[in-house]
Image: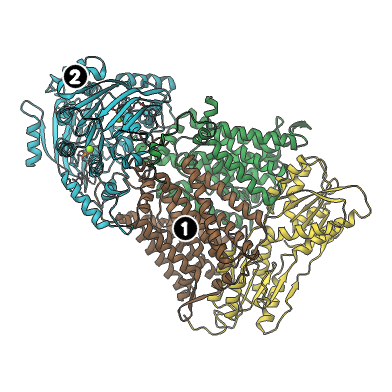
Amino acid sequence: MTILKNRLFWPAVILVALLVVNMFTSNQFITVRDGHLFGTLPDILRGSAPLLLVALGMTLVIATGGIDLSVGSVMAISGAVACLLISDLGNQNSVGSVLLIIGVAIVVSLVLGLWNGALVAAVGIQPIIATLILMVAGRGVAQLITDGQIINVQSSPYATIATGFFLAMPVAFLIAVGAVVLTVLLTRRTALGLLLESVGGSPTASRLAGIRSRRITVMTYVVSGGLAGLAGLIYSANIKSADSISAGNLIELDAILAVVIGGTALIGGRFSIAGTVIGALLIQTLGVTVVAVGVPSKATLLFKAVIVVALCLSQSATFRQKVFGRIKPRPATAVRAEVPA
Amino acid sequence: MGEPSPVLEMTGIRKVFPGVVALDGVDFRLFPGEIHALMGENGAGKSTLIKVLTGVYDIDGGDITLGGAAVRFTGPLQSQKAGVSTVYQEVNLCTNLSVAENIFIGREPRRLGRIQWGLMRKRAAELLARLDLNLDVSASLDTYSLAIQQMVAIARAVDVSARVLILDEPTSSLDASEVEQLFKVMRRLKEEGVAILFVSHFLDQVYEVSDRLTVLRNGKLIGEYKTAELPQVQLVEKMIGKELAVLDDLENKAQRTRAKTAEAAPILSATGLGRTGAIAPFDLTINAGEVVGLAGLLGSGRTELARLLFGADRADSGTLQIDGKDVTLRSPQAAMKHGIAFSSENRRTEGILGELTVRENIILALQASRGWTRPIPRRKQDELVDKYIKALQIRPADPEREVRMLSGGNQQKVLLARWLITEPRLLIIDEPTRGIDVGAKAEIQKLVAELSDGGVAVLFVSAELEEVLRLSHKIEVLRDRRLVEELENTEGVDADRIMQTIASGATS
Amino acid sequence: MTTVDMTPATNKSNSPTNPRRRVYLPNTKYIPILATLTLLLIMYFTGVANYRNFGQPSVVVNLFRDNAVLLVVAVGMTFVIITGGIDLSVGAVISMTTTLTATLLAGGWPPLVVLPLVLLLGALLGAGMGAVIHFFKVEPFIATLAGLFLARGIALFINQNSIPIRDKLWKSLSEYRIVLADGVVTKVTSVTAVVVVLIAAAVLAWTRFGRNVYAVGGNADSALLMGLPVGRTKIAVYTLSGFCAALGGVLFSINSTSGWALQGQGLELDAIAACVIGGVLLTGGSGYVFGSLLGVMVYGLIQTIITFQGDLNAAWTRIIIGLLLFGFIVLQRVVTRRAK
Amino acid sequence: GSKDDSTGSGSGDGKIVLGFSQVGAESGWRTANTKSIQDSAKAAGIELKFADAQGKQENQITAIRSFITQKVDVIAFSPVVTSGWDAVLKEAKDAGIPVILTDRAVDSQDTSLYVTFLGSDFIEEGKKAGQWLVDQYKGKTGPVSIVELQGTTGAAPAIDRQKGFADTIAADPNLKIVKSQTGDFTRAQGKTVMETFLQSTPKIDVLYAHNDDMGLGAIEAIEAAGKKPGTDIKIITVDAVKDGMTALSEGKINYIVECSPLLGPQLMDVVKQVKSGGSPEKRILTKETTFTQEQAKTELPNRQY
Ligand SMILES: Nc1ncnc2c1ncn2[C@@H]1O[C@H](COP(=O)(O)OP(=O)(O)OP(=O)(O)O)[C@@H](O)[C@H]1O
Ligand SMILES: Nc1ncnc2c1ncn2[C@@H]1O[C@H](COP(=O)(O)OP(=O)(O)OP(=O)(O)O)[C@@H](O)[C@H]1O
Ligand SMILES: [Mg+2]
Ligand SMILES: [Mg+2]
């Protein structure tokens, strides 16, 4: 009964349902081949890594009542930077320098996040616009870096972060999981989570309770930037090239959707990382399912629409009440008359 | 008067919230032309009864008849249409709209569907004038203090010609004079045959206006009585279900004898501190173990003064010394570093965080001062929280309940607890007893007394002058947002004396 | 029916401004708009100073013609945002409208049937989303995102190709030139847009519905306790937004005598941005249609400058847009702060 | 308004001013196309007013109108969509500015609205791809299952390349498109979709991708699945960008239909011709060919994009 009430119950159900569908459509849902997991499920897990990372950062930003539209562009930039530097390497396979370059790309993304945070917290611009600036300009910068072309790299260590396997598990997914665990620890093992929710709940009250709202806000944007950067690296490593034009294009929408599906309200306050994870996996699985069951491209959006509608209705307690029978008696007709149409 | 048929009758009302039975088989009658007080401790179910009646919550059981017909409202809109006009607890207005709009929205004067702004402002101004308020009615409501906002809410409610008028703790932050204005209006309406339901924790007020009262305890009906026939003491017993020792024990300690603070160095001393448009430059010193009370009419600038000392607003003139060292308080954190705590009068927008649990709300300030990297161990949290839930009798005593689900008074207690666990050296409390029931109020007053005996300095702001007099060693009188006089709270200093100062505005 | 918490979490209407601004300054509420207007003018004259032919009146006139659609959509969006909501479906509704219009007209339906039909459809979709948001307490973001998928899905399903409109009425509408002065002509679309703006501004300022919109945005729970028709208002604004989007779609189909399922992609973001630039608070409760108008103008002017600059490739186009936006917003902030 | 003479904003020196409105920068192909036009304009001494429409028709219409306002000498543009240009083209015509279409056609009935259309024919490209496949399997029996990676749903190239291909392979009943899904013209999507194709389809013989990028993405997926692209699965793509050609020469792709972005030089010639009163024919097909693996090896060295 209580589990039915849980906001995450229905998203989880839909996720499982979609996975089951894939079980039937796919040749191998999950098997072990030459020493690592292979099949649809591993593909989904690996493919979901970038979205997971981005949505994770988005969760924190949204918890403070903000929003980060720039994630896609940050992905593009970090990917571009990494591939540009790697392609200049003498030996693209030297693990050391690749790691260094990855570090550089991440730092760049953190700085970009800092820029967002500064605009929001210090200058006091509404988040949606503050991050819109980087969303627009950032992709331009990425295109400058790659000169509008696609930069190819032949670096196996770099490719590993997306396509490699560790302990039979896809590395990309492990990275995402690691990030999730870290974030959970960061927010729930410290007081950060509480302060975040408080700032998101009411900036005024938080300020009067002596919380350094600005610092916290800035931090969330920095984290979001960093995670987006990481996502960008995985994205580009996955195709062994930097595609500054389509990297992370429109991912902000999916990320926000994942967060909201996960039960975090856009006005800020309470946030649920577990929810976000389910949300992200759900969206990724949905994408795969569409292809697997062979929905014609022209009908793809309708298909998604149906799922999302089902989702948002299933999440509404009121709707469930109305459908699965109400406990309370409907208001007496006496006043119904007084209710204006 | 004889007994005509009640205009409103509620029978066997039941309302269950997850985890609590807020109302359990409550009957309630309201007769035309009477003022009926609804009494009960914090969390007794008063507001819930009102919200159930007006359709904010739907009922789990029971019947409501209004003017003989069975009704069940689907929302305030419907109840209003049916002639039930309500001021809910807490100020429920849209602070982003102008004063005039807040009074008239939903029933603006129109010609051909076009709102007549001029006329609307004129009417609003007149209406407020009748309550002795002259405000700029086209200013947005958030430019006014909470008390003003409360008056506006009242103005809105009394203006509609209703059969039933419901006032849930309308006087919680009003000063004597405003209360008088309100009572005048209530009496007038009563003459006109309006049935008035009135909730207040001020017994004297209840005895002054109400003809009849109904007592609730823990969501159950205790009884309905004619006010004249029920002595205060008995009323209190019925409300809390036991005799209230603390109360009279505090009654007879009228003047507080100053604790051993003779040699105490001033914790805080302000010279010429001020903020243009908010409060004129003032001098003020607060010693350890001293209770300093702020007295003044509403809008006199008490809150503004308090906020300056906490760094909630920045002073733009004067200097502030803490422990003899010059400091400028740029932010609340800065003040908290010096051991200053400030509990705002506006608990709803500046105080509690509704979505967070009682526990989280209570530890918030302490946690903030420690910084996010040093979380308070859960065990420690639970200890502290339990301690204060007991000390302040927060009900329901469930630390994991979301604060917005608590009754108004209990929310206030949570807010106090938040600051008490920071163990401040200077505790600034603005209207700390707003909406708190007699028992708890006495407890809190006792607490303040104990704190000061323990060497904590307290800046005590309250609209209730008696309270200020009872607790303070020293009383600062404000008027028109300037500090006009400082009084040692010795023999001979009483309400009249202070009102006198306020009236004459003797500038020291 | 509706349960109201004792302390609503949605009471953040005034968080960006100092909620404790006790001293009342006359009409500080207009400062953002004035600031925006001033900066807009500055931007315009910089353009005039730097580019040949920028000073021509037609540049300004075309600003309205080229942004007519965005303008109409932004108007609807303004209402939604003031109630504290958001509508992501507008761009998709446009695409649906254009595709449907084109298909029906191609199918020989009489234009005077098609026009009201598509407008009604847009309004209905809006109403649907509004209902879901109000009755089922679904986040506007998800509800309208579903609306987006649905509308564009329908459009793509109807026809993926872009469909030409050969209908006489549409053609004549799109070619009809309204001469303002010699050499300065405008089109039906821009006039429609301006009319819509004026009507909307009036509604927002002078009607009960308009004021309820502000109240709901200021604090929905208080509004409910004040006995305002919160539900009706919410549904109404989404209906309105849906209608405006559909109207935008019609203007679109007139402007480019064609329909296409990918039309108006990302327009929702432009509209939201325009509103916010124009000083509408996403947290709800404050903003003006006129502000959104200015926001759209800023957007349009930036585009114009880009085209007049004329030597920017994709990358630089984006960067310059970003920079201009940045400069504008920051200045706007600074000016507004100073003034207050 | 400034009373400029016919040379319009042409800064006095009679230099030709060309207003060009580009679709956007949705792919490497497009950027190459943009570069080519900008470079060759410089080379030809033509002042280029370039506007990037970011994939939006409204922006493009705006740009063209602004060109009219700026009184450029010639307008050229690659339409985002085929329909809906009559009005703005008419304005250009009224302003006496000749218009040249590049790379994509418009469906205006009144062909006098533009001087010429210079560019490739997407349907033709689809046909070429299909034809090669038909030839490959001529005489062979047994079903051939084909998967298709479409371009962005609703985009002209996607629709036409699908149509041309489908029409042609209809000739051989053995050739069947078993799965077809959009890959948005991008590598990443191409890879993801191909992964799922591989997982959800019993047997894939042929992959037809609407552009090289999607094909290259798909190759990654195929290799990851332990198959050999080009042998286990035959791959046909369109565009012939450098990366594509490399893969082709390495035998990972079997056949590429060229769709050249290097319209610049040709365009400038036409512009000059138009400006000097000449009238080029209504349809100028860009010199485009197709590449097999062998041809690729020889061609690869002199690919500059
Ligand atoms: N929205 C809610 N959800 C859950 N429980 C609630 C809610 N509102 C009130 N309660 C519970 O119902 C009980 C009665 O609350 P109510 O507000 O009626 O008390 P009250 O008599 O008004 O107290 P006060 O004098 O402090 O206002 C309390 O225990 C409170 O915790
Ligand atoms: N009669 C009034 N006319 C105009 N403004 C008023 C009036 N009363 C109060 N105010 C507003 O209230 C502010 C001061 O109220 P403040 O809360 O600081 O004093 P207070 O004594 O605490 O009043 P309250 O008891 O209402 O809290 C002033 O800045 C002013 O904006
Ligand atoms: Mg109450
Ligand atoms: Mg006060």
Chain to which mark 2 belongs: B
Establish if D212 lies above or below C44: above
Chain identifier, cyan in the render:
B
Q: Nearer the viewer, residue A329 or A319?
A: A329
Percent from the top left, x then y, of residue B78? Answer: 35, 40
Residue B469 located left or right of residue B69: left
**Res A292 visible:** yes
What is the spatial separation of the Cα atoms under label 2 and label 1, in whole angstroms?
A: 61 Å
Q: Residue B393: x percent and y percent?
A: 31, 20
Chain letter, yellow = D
Q: Nearer the viewer, residue B507 or D199?
A: D199
Give the image quarter of residue B409: top left
Tell me how the rendering is colored: by chain
Circle 2 SS class: helix
- Label 2, on which residue? B247
Q: What residue would you read off at disc 1? A: C74
Residue C99 position (above or below residue C186): above
Report which colour depicts chain A. green
The image quadrant of residue D275 is: bottom right
Asked whether residue D259 appears in the rendered view, the answer is no
Q: Label the brown chain with its letter.
A: C
On the picture, is D142 further left or further right than C313?
right
Q: Position of residue A205 (x, y in %)?
A: 35, 37
| Residue at x-position 36% and y-position 19% | B386
The residue lying at 34 percent from left, 48 percent from top is C17
Ligand 3's image quarter is top left
